[in-house]
Structures are given as C-alpha cells and as structure tokens.
Image (tube, rainbow, N blue to C red):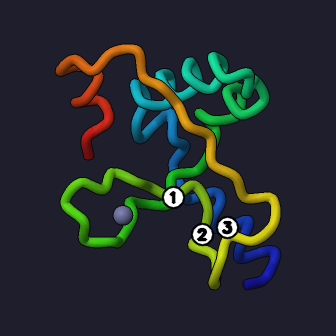
Amino acid sequence: MTAEGELTSELVRPQLSEVLPDFAEELARLLRAEGEHQLADDIGAQRFYGWCTCTDDFCQSFRTAPEPNGAYGPGHRSIPLLPERHDQSSMSSMAR
Ligand SMILES: [Zn+2]
C-alpha cells in the first residue's frame, strides 16, 4: 500500500469515539486506572477498522488498524482491564 493510500484510508475510517462513544470513554477510564495515560488520551481518536471477522459468538473484538499480515510482531502487548461494573448499561455499551 502506498503512503497516499494509507492516508486516504485513515481519513475515511471513523474515530472510535464516534462509533462507540460510551465504550471509548470507559476504555479511557480503565486505561488510566492501569497507568496507561498516553493510550487513554489517544484511544478516542483511534480509527475504527471494523469488527473481528472470526465467527465466535462471544467475540466482541474490533480493529483499530489494518489486520497484520501474519503475527503482530515485536512491540505488541496486551493490557488486562478490570471493568468496575457489569450491569446492563455497561454491557450494552460494549455490545455490537
Ligand atoms: Zn473474533
């Protein structure tokens, strides 16, 4: 993909804060609780690239970047987050 193509696709992808505003806020709050302030500041501006294309019923994953060609590679890490609430409003904001 050319640099121009990447720029174009960035512009047409909606921001996470537009697609899932409640979830983006919750995610930022939980990231701050883990000391991930830079990620928390940036999360709402991440581009929504679409839902995971696996067919698992329970999967609610989505992408904020193009799918890698192979493994995620060096620099990839996971951050476990602990939601404070598991009530209806919290869960519905996370559902598709
Ligand atoms: Zn999935």
User: Can you say whether 22 is above or below 95 in the image?
Assistant: above
Q: Which mark sits nearer the N-terminus, 2 or 3?
A: 3
Q: Which mark is residue 8?
A: 3
Distance of label 2 from label 1 (alpha carbons): 7 Å
Q: Which residue is at a point 41% across and 41% down the rendered structure image? A: 19
Please tell me whether mark 2 sits on a helix, a strand or a loop: loop
The residue lying toward the viewer, choosing from 91 and 9, is 91
Percent of width and height locating residue 27 = 52, 28
Q: Which mark sits nearer the N-terminus, 1 or 3?
A: 3
Please say if the residues under marks 2 and 1 sit with CB atoms less than 8 Å apart. Answer: yes
Q: Any atom of ligand 1 within 8 Å of the CB at mark 1? A: no
Q: Which residue is at a point 25% across and 66% down the rendered structure image? A: 56
Left or right: 10 in relation to 87: right
Residue 84 location, quadrant = top left
Percent of width and height locating residue 9 = 62, 67
Percent of width and height locating residue 40 = 67, 27
Give the crowd class for mark 3: few <14, some 14-19, many >=20 residues within 10 Å.
few
> Which residue bears the numbered disc 1?
63
Percent of width and height locating residue 71 = 65, 77
Residue 72 location, quadrant = bottom right
Q: Which mark is residue 66?
A: 2
